[in-house]
Image (tube, rainbow, N blue to C red):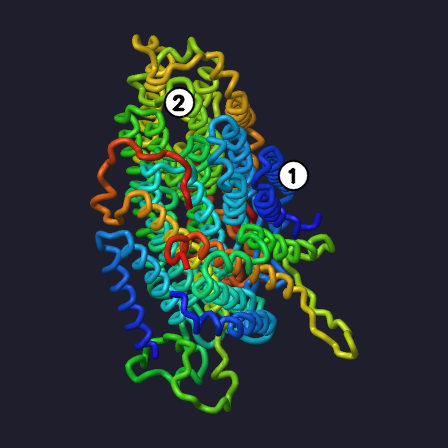
Amino acid sequence: MTMVLAICVAVTFGVSIYLMLGRELKGIAMGVFLLGHAANLSIIAMSGSPILHTHGAEASRAPATLEPISEHLDEQRHPLMTGVNIKQPPVLEHHEPMTDPLATIVDPLPQALILTAIVISFGVMAFLLTLLVVTSRRTHTLAIAELAQEPAPEPDGGPAQA
Amino acid sequence: MSSSILRTAMGLIFPLTLLFAVYMALKGHNQPGGGFIGGLIAAVALVMVRMSHGRDVMASVMPFHPRLLIAGGLAMAGVTGVVPLLFGHPLLTSRAPYVHLLGEAIHVPTALFFDLGVLMVVVGVAAGMIFRLGGEVDPA
Amino acid sequence: MNTDLIILLCVIPLAAGVLNVFLINQRAASRCVSIASFVAVLALSMYFLLYTAPLTGADSVLVSQMGGWKAPFGITMVFDSLSGLLIAAAATVALGSYIHSFSTLDPAVERRYYHPLMQMLLFGVNMSFLTGDLFNLFVAFEVMLMSSYSLLVIGTGMKQMRQAYKYVLLNVLASTIFLMAAGMVYGMFGTLNIADLARIVAEIEADPARSLPTGFTALAVMFLLVFGLKGAFFPLWFWLPDTYYTIPIAVAGLFGGLLTKVGVYTVARLFPLIFASDGAGGISLTIQVILVVAAAFTMFLAVLGAVSQHEVRRILSIHVISQVGYMVFGIAVMSGNALAGCAFYMIQHMVVKCALFLCCGVMEKHAGTDDLDKLGGLLKRDWKLGVLFFIAAMSLVGLPPLSGFFGKMVIIRSGFGEGYWYLGVVGLVTGALTLLSMLKIWSYGYCNPTPKDGYPVQTEPKAVIAGNRPAYFGIAMLVLAALFLGFGAEPVYTVAFKAGEQLENPKAYITAVLGDEAYATAESLAAEHAEIQVDSVQGSPATTDVRTDERAGSPVLAEVATHAPAEVSP
């Protein structure tokens, strides 16, 4: 599953960067939105089974050593991933009955992060789309080459109609 | 885009969608759901009204100007957060008391009001976007 | 005192912003609400600073755990000396430019949510200064950026919109990288709490058997890219001059004062504590080289750009970048004193730069242009503005009794003391060139005779002065604040040195956030390690005492070394 996610993230990134390199603002905006999705997917890949933090001084709780988090995860690891200590993404591959609850519980924090990021990108998207609409109403174009030319005198310097 | 089939069906779809939005918002305390999701679903209901009946009807469906909905929602969430401060607790501390009503113990966490604030903000933002950006799409 | 009250620094602007939306058509009322909010934030931050001033160690760091969730799990708000200084300066700058906008901002623009947006901007900025959590920092950045996007296109012409695209797209890109980097931090360390990260890094540093996770340096560089873009470091500064050139002047003053400092602040907060670590108690070479190069080029190239420009706004905007270079210099040296100098320089630069932008606004009111070729004779026309401008300009340059001097002195001196003499030389040359460009504005704009065919826009001096009283008031307030920072540098530096010490030595911060025993593992590991070393070299004192020896280079440094907590000087 980690592999599948990695490929997804890579493809989404690729498409978004291709879009952002275009010469039309609409495409660039779409690329920016897609980039947010790629980032969210990559956070999914970072998350996984919970790392239980107990507050205190046990050095063992720090996962920085990248030791296997639980025996269980070690068994589940994809053959390609042996020897690499990567957490499993929180996606169930088979509809197995929940025999061991600890194996199926995932760390909720990355998902909270993603939800927050989605809300924020929702706001940014609204702003960017409004900007695009206002620009196209005023200039009747969204091509960067045309927008970049210094216009002669300003047709209207008044407040935005958005 | 306005078709009579959609327009007729809206009489059923609109209240049901709003009800579903409220259900999702209330469910969010212990299960997937919450104010943001509820707000988005309510916004979908508004979008459908906008598509079927046009801008004016949508404006009449909205109880307040979107601006007031956003500010009111922010204020509601903010007040819920600040109240614990007055009692010497950190911001956003929540309590989950049970209210006894008609012999039933109803779980009323204070986070509910925060979530309702979020719902109002989301509906307000979405409605504002539809008003502004959908201006020239379809004079219906 | 109930430390949970620190969150009021965020709640007040938020509440004022919401209130202002309801008061959208009542100008007088929303102005009163906004001013009350700025003054309240200023007063509260001052109060907290005075309250923490006599305290030491973990007591001097005020912590509030949101919703009562204990530290690594919930969101933490942390008020230490650095955040306190910056919040006070931010509120001052916001108040000054807000009052200034009463006379310089078009009333039609003002109705377009200008008042709520100003409050939300301050809310975002304060939250980024207060937050003790990496993800919450991202959220605070976004709040700040959304308000800044909207303020950027407020009252727009098409020219402003074009620049807005550049700013918005670049910042969205940077935010996305920030988001991914935060996700990676969580993947590597399992926590996003800054104090918890600092604790883990300190434990790894203290334990020779452990090393930092693979990719840690790459992660640090990602963060540096994000914050460098927001803070306009070399080579990520390109968006800044064009953006600040087109927006309403009061907003330009606020942005010039505030926004870049938030980027610099996050670097100053996160890098000495966490991301500059090489896992063995030193500073990662990669990060250090990047910071040193960025500091040198930011200072020097930007000031060359400023010297070559001929429009006041452009000179001032490019100077923002050049001054950011000094702050990066302070961070690159990464000693407690250099960081204290950086903190002082940040607050003085916020105030002074904003005052200069606001002066430029009144100059534009007089002449209708900010092109130095078409200006002249302003000193005769309006000597009060001349005096205010001169004080602010010389504070920026750093002539001795004024505020810029004390900032630059400490930074450059610690640079020479710690072996970064080349940065010190660049800093001195940059200072001289800053003087040159400020004198250019002064002589062309104020001392030269008025052009023969008058200004592009003919104005009556008395009418302009009478019509812009709020503007003068705003400028005068900021200039007074700058003078205070100059003549009252002693008490401000007491706080700034404490901020530097807190940044260099994470113990106070970590124990304040996580509790008393949190730092114990790192300390006991360090002690064990030191014992082993001492045993192996037969008790030679040189190995244990390196850090204190290095510090004793200059009198200022020695003074701080005496304040240093016990575990540094055994």
Say which residue appears at 42% left-offset and 21% top-offset. Answer: C365
Visible residue check, residue C87:
yes
Instruction: Where is residue C99? Give x, y as percent.
Output: 54, 29
N-terminal label among 1 and 2: 1
Image disc number at residue C364: 2
Disc 1 to disc 2: CB gap under 8 Å = no
Chain hosting mark 2:
C
Say above or below: A113 vs A156: below
Q: Residues within 10 Å of mark 1 (few under 14, many from 20)?
A: some
* Front of the two marks 1 and 2: 2
Say which residue appears at 30% left-offset and 72% top-offset. Answer: A8
Q: Amino acid at mark 2?
A: Glu
Instruction: Where is residue C229? Give x, y as percent.
Output: 35, 46
Both marks 1 and 2 on one chain: yes
Image disc number at residue C47: 1
C106 or B93: nearer the viewer? C106
Say which residue appears at 44% left-offset and 90% top-offset. Answer: A96
Q: Residues within 10 Å of mark 2 (few under 14, many from 20)?
A: some
Q: Amino acid at mark 1?
A: Tyr
C119 or C338: nearer the viewer? C119
Q: CA distance from mark 1 to mark 2?
A: 37 Å
Instruction: Where is residue C359? Give x, y as percent.
Output: 44, 23
Say above or below: C4 vs A9: above
Q: Callout 2: helix, strand or loop?
A: helix
Q: Callout 1: helix, strand or loop?
A: helix
Image disc number at residue B37: none
Visible residue check, residue C552:
no
Q: Quadrant of residue C446?
A: top left
Instruction: Where is residue C41? Give x, y as percent.
Output: 60, 40
